[in-house]
Image (cartoon, rainbow, N blue to C red):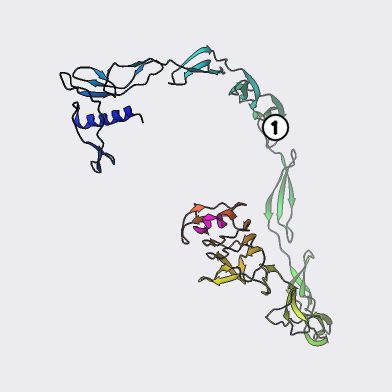
Amino acid sequence: MKKSAIIALSIGLLVMSAGIISCGEERTGINTEGGGSGTDIVETPEPSIPEIPTVGHTHELKYIDGVEAGCENGGYSEYWHCDVCGKIFDEEGNETVKIIIPATGHEYETRKEEETCTTNGYTEHKCTKCGETYRDEVTAAQGHEYEETGIIRESTCEIEGVMKYECKHCGEEKAESIAKKGHRYEITVSEATCTEKGYIKYTCEECGEEKTEVTEESLGHDYIEIRVSATCESAGYVEYECVVCGDKYREITEEATGHEYGVREVKAPTCTEDGYTVYNCEVCGEEHIDDITEAKGHDWNAVTIITEATCGHYGEAEYGCGECGATKTERTEKKDHEYGTGWEYDETRHWHEAYCECEYGEMSEHIMENGECIVCGYGERLEYEENEDGTLTVIGLGSVSARDVAIPSEYRGKAVTRIADGAFKDEKRITSVKIGENVEYIGNEAFYGCTALRNIEFEEKDGWYCARSSDATTGTKLTITSNVYLELTGGNARNYYYLRKTDLSV
């Protein structure tokens, strides 16, 4: 800051606090900080005031700050003014005059704005120093030039259509109506019948609209009578038939007489056939079977074993009916296997020890995850800790030596829901991790320091967030992407816990 500016600031503070200062008067300045509260008062150095000899009176100086010259208005330099004698002094105390600084004049930049369909064009001149702006060389707006771009709605017989237009210069759109077509009818003439009126039908060939005009009333039926007597099953009636259109209807004159049955044959049931009674109508000869009794079925009370069944082979037995003497031969089911409950295994397979004629039971190849067979437990395994609710927490690599680590959704029938704090910290040989869908907690520093880890795959990607505590109910959403490993292995891994709740909005 210039010396003159420092003196101006100091004198300004003194004038504000104590009024006009007489030449040569000494006064200690004060400075109030902290928002003008009146506290924290500190002493400031006394401002330098020009030393001017007394000439008939003591000068009372007032500091006048300088004003910079603008584009249109001039300025002047800073000075001290004595209110007693009206003289002007510089910062050294020398009598001087007010130095006027002439206006600098505008410096314009020019910008050309072309006319559009709805706005005029112009040239704009803007001063780079003061921002003053004016426009000239105005050109009139050119107006829209529309052309058809397609039909929005086709016109129908009763509704106007709509044509779409677009300005080829600016793209503004408008719509105009298309005249409706009006109906074009096809005429159909129908003569009257026994039940229908005669009419003329008008159908529009364009839209299908219909209207009808009645030309004559219906004629009515002209019936003849046909009489039929009752039988055992059918009622007697008079049938009326129209000789004009063939319409028919009946009127019942007597009820059916009904059958008069007698028993013709009775058959007893056997082992394989139902028993029944045959009835015969003595009037019309109609015959029907009734009083059905089910077949008794064979009584297979004689059994002879031909071949004994084992766990590997079906057996065979002969059965005899004591009622009719019939015989049949049937296969008998295999016996159940008898296996031990524990697993036997070698390097490639596992099986149950057999107590029947088989050599072994349920032999299959190992299903390995994290170096351990998930069926029999052969091989390497992660280290787990059981939670109070019966689920499991992964607490370390255990005996797993693989570089690709899979944290399962379940282990030996129990859900794996958590990865403990620092579970894999500084395990530098791990290159990838797959996290099962049941996992909903990843502890602080669980993967911190795993510098070779470049891929973390989540079976369940939704609902994850990171928080400052292990029991937080809200936090910052964690987006599962290909580089999410940076979040779990970098600096944030030392300060955050990662949780998943499917009903949480973050």
320 shown above or below 444: below
Depth order, front residue of 420/431? 431
Q: Is 268 above or below relative to 244?
A: below
Q: Nearer the viewer, residue 102 or 236?
A: 102
- Is residue 494 in the magenta section? yes
Give whichever of 424, 274 is nearer the camera.
424
Is residue 187 or residue 360 the one in the foreground?
A: 360
Residue occupying image coordinates x 50% and y 12%: 136
Please tell me which residue is depicted at 52% across the width and 15% down the height of the picture: 123
Q: Secondary structure at mark 1?
A: loop
Q: Is residue 435 left or right of residue 292?
A: left
> In this rendering, would 36 be left or right of 179?
left
Is residue 309 positioned above or below 228 on the image?
below
Q: Is residue 181 visible?
A: no
Asked if 283 appears above or below 340 in the picture, the reply is: above
- Amino acid carrying mark 1 in the image: Ala
Q: Magenta stretch mostly in which secondary structure?
A: helix
Q: Position of residue 488 (x, y in %)?
A: 56, 57
Residue 437 magenta-highlighted = no
Percent across and percent down for residue 67 are 34, 21
The residue drawn where x is 38% and y is 19% is 69
Residue 376: % across, % down: 68, 75
Residue 253 in view:
yes
Rendered location of residue 206, percent (x, y):
69, 27
Please give the residue where the numbered disc 1 appears in the rendered image: 192
Callout 1: 10 Å neighbours few (<14), some, many (20+)?
some
Figure quadrant of residue 168: top right
Quarter of the image with the N terminus in it: top left
* In this rendering, position of residue 216 left or right of residue 297: left
Where does the magenta region start and end? 487-496
